[in-house]
Amino acid sequence: MRPLMAVLLLVALTACSGEAASPGPSAETARPTSTGTPTPSATASDTPAERGRLRFAKIGEFDKPVAFAVREGDDRLYVAEQSGRLRTSTGDTVIDLSGEVSSGNEQGLLGVAFHPSGRWVYLDWTDAQGDTHVTEWAYDGSKATARRDVLTQEQPFANHNGGQLAFGPDGHLYIALGDGGGAGDPLGNGQKLGTLLGKILRIDPRGDPYTIPKDNPFAGRKGAKGEIWAYGLRNPWRFAFDRETGDLWIGDVGQNEWEEVDHQPAGSKGGENYGWSLREGKERFHGGKGDDLTQPVIVYPLGEDGNCSVIAGPVYRGKKIPWLRGHFLYGDFCAGWIKAAPAGTPGEAAEVGEVEQLSSFGEGHDGEVYALSLQGPLYRIDPA
């Protein structure tokens, strides 16, 4: 993996190459969709006209914030700190795993999501041995109780842990897991359907310990894990559902050459193969070949102008910034730029602002967007 920028114990935020540890998503370049790749859903506002700049208003300070969530019926913002605490925008600590999480570039508390009912909260974190847990607590707005592990996954290396959690429009929990780490996917996990590593999973977490939806693409298939929703991913650090269309946008951190954004239309039945480690970005990786690979919709070169790790955000559906509606937001952890791309034509991205050490985005109940910096700030995105 690529060495991390000095000073950081990052989560999965920076792309990796070689054998040095680096946090975050892996880099793969994104370019306009190629023939055979579904075109992202468009809306009337999906035009590049009149794009401008954004203002980032600091509204909070946290310890290495890496993930963001909101809860039904609750006005507070919830922020996951890589060091192990889930905290609110009002300063409360809801859950403290700081004595249990592993520390390292791509380890720690990595993701948070609330059940659509608001009754349960889920955290994605790595334990002292470096293994991944997705853990549930019952939550009444003041106290988290009835802790139980929903899913665990052994990790062969310390890097490429993914960590994103999100409930989709269908009410199921989607979970990002990286390929398990090591340069070049040495275990071949990205293309193996018999492991959860290198995948996005889809489960109902309210089972015993969870239930696999019957319509998952590999449910019941011999030799395949039924939890798998999509595969061929290196380190999908952040993904987001478009709250209006239901489309899924995935930022997958690359190896040595490319950062990429992948897209899954709302009508998909799952099962997409995004190519890793047969391909990095749109290029063959170590001579890899494969059929029916889903092409990225955005790619950009790793290392150019300081690029190191893609951070995927939401498609903006708020009201404060009319020109931004229908635009997919993404950025780069090391370079710090943030770009907005019309969801219907994601190759037409334009730079709209900067956040140093951008670690994640968040979306409020009203569709307004927030940005997190690993340095500590939580920013609200406003019109310039």
Image: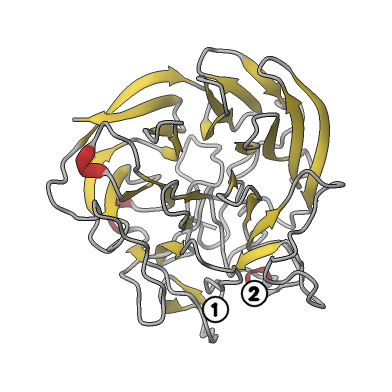
Q: In which quarter of the image is the N terminus?
A: bottom right
Query: Is 322 on the left-hand or right-hand side of 344?
Result: left
**Outermost residue toward the right in this view:** 208
The image quarter in which residue 281 lies: bottom left
Q: At which x and y percent is residue 135?
A: 75, 38
Image point 37% across, 60% down: which residue? 302
Label 1 crowd bin: few (<14), some (14–19), many (20+), radius 10 Å: many
Above/below status of 290 relative to 9: below
Q: Nearer the viewer, residue 190 or 183?
A: 190
Residue 271 placed where, x, y %? Answer: 61, 71
Residue 274 % position (x, y): 52, 71
Q: Mark 2 points at which residue?
A: 191
Give the residue pinned by disc 1. Answer: 278
Percent position (x, y) of residue 28?
43, 64
Number of numbered discs visible in the structure rendering = 2
Taking 325 as reference, is 93 above or below it?
above
